[in-house]
Image (cartoon, coloured by chain):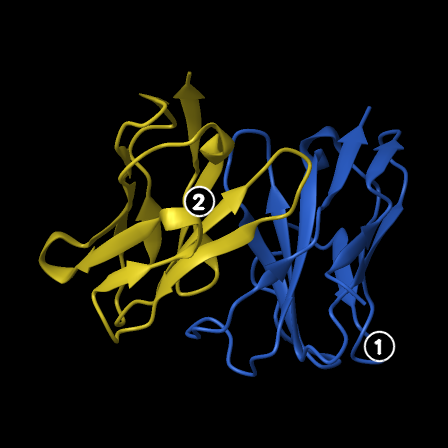
Amino acid sequence: AQSVTQLGSHVSVSEGALVLLRCNYSSSVPPYLFWYVQYPNQGLQLLLKYTSAATLVKGINGFEAEFKKSETSFHLTKPSAHMSDAAEYFCALNQFYFGTGTSLTVIP
Amino acid sequence: GAGVSQSPRYKVAKRGQDVALRCDPISGHVSLFWYQQALGQGPEFLTYFQNEAQLDKSGLPSDRFFAERPEGSVSTLKIQRTQQEDSAVYLCASSTGTVAGKSTDTQYFGPGTRLTVL
């Protein structure tokens, strides 16, 4: 069975603070993992993806994620939140399986 | 020839009506995917095409849902006898890849069609 769990449907951070969005997965095959961002009235846009090369993956807009097999996790981080980061974030496994999303609010 | 486009962007249907949702993928993309996204949820896989072949339709919720891609480019998702539970955003995505379900290929998503069934 393959599934994705995103802990925290809503996360609020202050502008300039660390962003941490959590994603755990369950997969019967070696996983490929993705983070997408969705702005209002727009399609999902790829932030970054893990393809079994490097475990620390850097993406667009200063985001990065670390694949930890022992913890079955692929958490998304950004050192300093910007107002423009406010959006919905989705973790996905093996292309088809999406989490329920985390809505990020950035407080000025 | 920018990204994936979908039409209509918004559709209101009365319960029992048939609807057709269109997806224009990025030119040359082999793979095309349909997802259903209910309010407050993540996208749920519906079906996948490689060129004109529908290789996986395991996510279609009932036989009222039908998808086609006859010439390997534009795709149409049809829902017959719509029900209120069909209300959702329907997302289309395309990619260059030829191996779905276990692929690192980036999916490019359209803006979606918001279907409301009254």
Q: Nearer the viewer, mark 1 or mark 2?
A: 2
Quadrant holding the N terminus of chain A:
bottom left
- Provide the secondary structure element on which disc 1 rests: loop
Nearest to the observer: residue B81 or residue B95? B95
Query: Which residue corresponds to mark 2?
Result: A90
- Residue at 85 percent across and 80 percent down: it is B71
- Provide the secondary structure element on which disc 2 rests: strand
Horizontal relation, residue A4 to residue B98: left or right: left
Q: In the figure, the blue chain has which letter?
A: B
- Residue at 73 percent across and 61 percent down: it is B3
Query: Which residue corresponds to mark 1?
Result: B70
The mark found on residue B62 in the picture is none
Amino acid at the residue labelled 2: Phe
Residue A6 location (% of width, % of height)? 33, 39
Horizontal relation, residue B53 to residue B11: left or right: left
Chain A palette colour: yellow
The chain letter for the residue carrying disc 1 is B
Residue A5 location (% of width, % of height)? 31, 42
Nearest to the observer: residue B43 or residue B13? B43
